[in-house]
Amino acid sequence: MEIDGTDRKILRLIQEDGRLTNAEIATRIGLSQPACWKRLKRLEATVVRSYNAALDPQALGLGIFAFVNVMLDNHSEKAMQAFEASVTAMPNVLCCHNISGKYDYLLQIIVPDMESFHRIGIRQIRELGNVKEIYTGFSLKEIKRSPSFPI
């Protein structure tokens, strides 16, 4: 799918504020409402994954943000799929990336406190099986978090 300059304008606007109406988007980019609606629906079918609210983790009592590197024992396709399915089901795992280098996966985990991290970030991951090594780094201060892609 080809994304032109007008599509990019729409995407920038909805990344900044997903609650904008079609009329507001159309006005801001200088399109008719029907033309804007058509483009927006096409983008929602192909590019836009979802609309979300950006929440404050501190206000929710989620004060520990950890980066957990995981090395597996077994690298068969079946073993890796099992690991991926298990971490996908863990609500405190915000992101899971299959990475290059020494470790196989990088997880981003958020929890209220260190006791919760030990229970979720260490014990639950080890209990998944097939885990050879875990290395954890904790965020001391978040400098930047952007929900937007550079488009």
Image: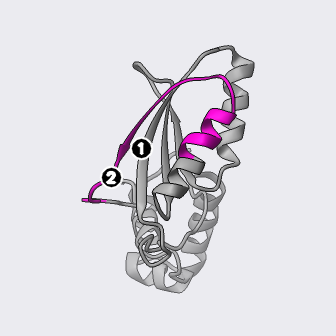
Instruction: Write down the quadrant of residue 50 in the picture.
Output: bottom right
Chain part drawn in magenta: 121-144
Side (left or right) of 52 relative to 102: right
Image location (x, y in percent) of residue 149: 39, 54
At label 2, the amino acid type is Ser
Residue that label 2 marks:
139
Q: Which numbered marker is on residue 67? A: 1
Question: Which residue: 57% across, 58% down?
Answer: 48
- Among the two numbered marks 1 and 2 on one chain, the one whose residue lies closer to the N terminus: 1
Number of other residues with Cα within 10 Å of mark 1, as a class: few under 14, some 14 to 19, many 20 or more: some
Question: If the image is split into quadrants, where does the C terminus sit?
Answer: bottom left
As displayed, is residue 12 above or below residue 84? Answer: below
As displayed, is residue 124 above or below residue 114? Answer: above
As displayed, is residue 146 above or below residue 93? Answer: below
As displayed, is residue 4 above or below residue 39? Answer: above
The local secondary structure at tag 2 comes to loop
Residue 71 falls within the magenta-colored stretch: no
The local secondary structure at tag 1 comes to strand
At label 1, the amino acid type is Phe
Question: Which residue: 47% across, 51% down?
Answer: 3
Image location (x, y in percent) of residue 123: 61, 41
* Distance between the alpha carbons at the discs numbered 1 and 2: 8 Å
Image location (x, y in percent) of residue 106: 47, 36
Residue 124 falls within the magenta-colored stretch: yes
Question: If the image is split into quadrants, where does the N terminus sit?
Answer: top right
Q: Nearer the viewer, residue 150 or 88?
A: 88
Contact check, label 1 and label 2, Cβ < 8 Å: yes
Q: Which numbered marker is on residue 31? A: none
Number of other residues with Cα within 10 Å of mark 2, as a class: few under 14, some 14 to 19, many 20 or more: few
Q: Nearer the viewer, residue 94 or 11?
A: 94
Instruction: Write down the quadrant of residue 146 in the picture.
Output: bottom left
Q: Outermost residue, front direction? A: 115
